[in-house]
Image (cartoon, rainbow, N blue to C red):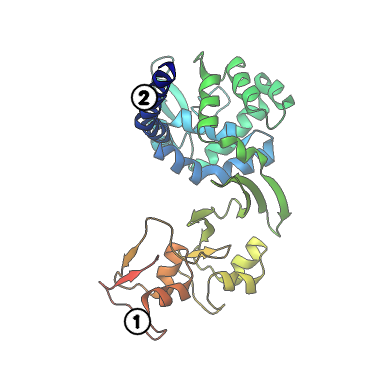
Amino acid sequence: MCVMKLYIRLFFICLLLAVYFPQLQGQKKKTRNPDYEKYIEKYKMLAIQQQHEYKIPASIILAQGLFESGAGSSRLARLGNNHFGIKCKPEWRGGRIYHDDDEKNECFRTYKTVEESFIDHSLFLAKRKYYVTLFDLDIHDYKGWAYGLQKCGYATDKSYGSKLVGIIEAYDLHKYDKARVIEKTPLIDDIYEIKIHTPSETRKHYPAVTNWRRRLHETNGVYYIEAQENDSYEFIAYDTGMKLKRLLKYNETTKDQKLKTGDRVYLQKKRKYAARGNGLHVVKNGESLHGISQLYGMKLHSLYKLNKIKESYTPKPGDTLKIRK
């Protein structure tokens, strides 16, 4: 009889887990803010470069940027490109914006670009005596940095340190602290290697090029830069330290191909198909098959194969093309 009662209890426990565990899992997934994820994707390489230049953990830079600017949505960020809530201070000679904070109508710094805000944040920490002890910490000690910033008076919020740690751990920002320079290019570019855990818990290496002249972007898991005015594949190859032949191969083109401002130039092999969630593409006026393949970071021959078309085919506005199986 006792055994029977035990089985009944176990049955109900299993039933409860079957009902509520998936809901809890779903709630856990919902805690990741998509605006935060976009911000991280957009500025992670800039944070890594700041870490390399000033020895401030990239995870701390990103967490402070996210928290102080509301992932770029705050008034200071929108109107003044100020992503770190840095006030004017007596030595500041740049742009100003006034905002209510600890006191009414306080003076905050403004910048021409977000990059300038990131650089000034690094200099603000590196050049002020209040934060000198932080630079004795290990670059991977994000907790020490987070609570140290609070202790050194970066913010008046008494839970500032724990909030930064919470952001870092929720979005795995500490993985960017492991980025290391693996190659120097002819200009000031650095090629970084970031070790990232994939869902299968295997490690992959993502080489990427970044500098002050060219911002790095990513789509479909492939890094690219955007062509600038009067750009060419030859110049981009020199600028990034890549072999021209390899760059042309990645982009399935020839060196005579003219580039327009904003065109995507891939620095890695494109994927076979478009990313998940992209099944079909409706052709717009002026689009070519090569341009569509560049848009999705997928190989051109896959477009031909998926849609059973010949190389002589010219897409027309309104045509629907498969971009993924």
| Nearer the observer, 165 or 53 | 165
Q: Position of residue 295 (x, y in %)?
A: 42, 64
Q: CA distance from mark 2 to mark 1?
A: 62 Å
Mark 2: few/some/many CA within 10 Å (<14, 14-19, 20+): few
Q: Which structural element holds mark 2?
A: helix
Q: Residue furthest bottom?
A: 312
Question: The disc labelled 1 sits on which kind of residue?
Answer: Thr
Could you say where residue 107 lies in the image, as x and y percent from the top left?
45, 23
Residue at which label 1 appears: 314
Would residue 93 be seen by someone viewing this image from the given angle?
A: no
For residue 185, side relative to residue 62 (left or right): right
**Quadrant (top left/top right/bottom left/bottom right) for the C terminus:** bottom left
Q: Mark 2 — residue? A: 12
| Mark drawn on residue 147 | none
Looking at the image, is 246 positioned above or below residue 106? below
Q: Residues within 10 Å of mark 1 (few under 14, many from 20)?
A: few
Taking the spot 42% from the left edge, 36% from the top edge, the residue there is: 29
Q: Residue at x 72, y 52 (%)?
A: 182
Residue 11: image x %, image y %?
A: 38, 27
- Horizontal placement of 136 versus 161: left or right? right
Work out whether residue 43 can be spotted.
Answer: yes
The residue sitting at the left extreme is 318
**Position of residue 314 in the picture relative to residue 179 (left or right):** left
* Rendered residue at 53%/59% (across/down): 224
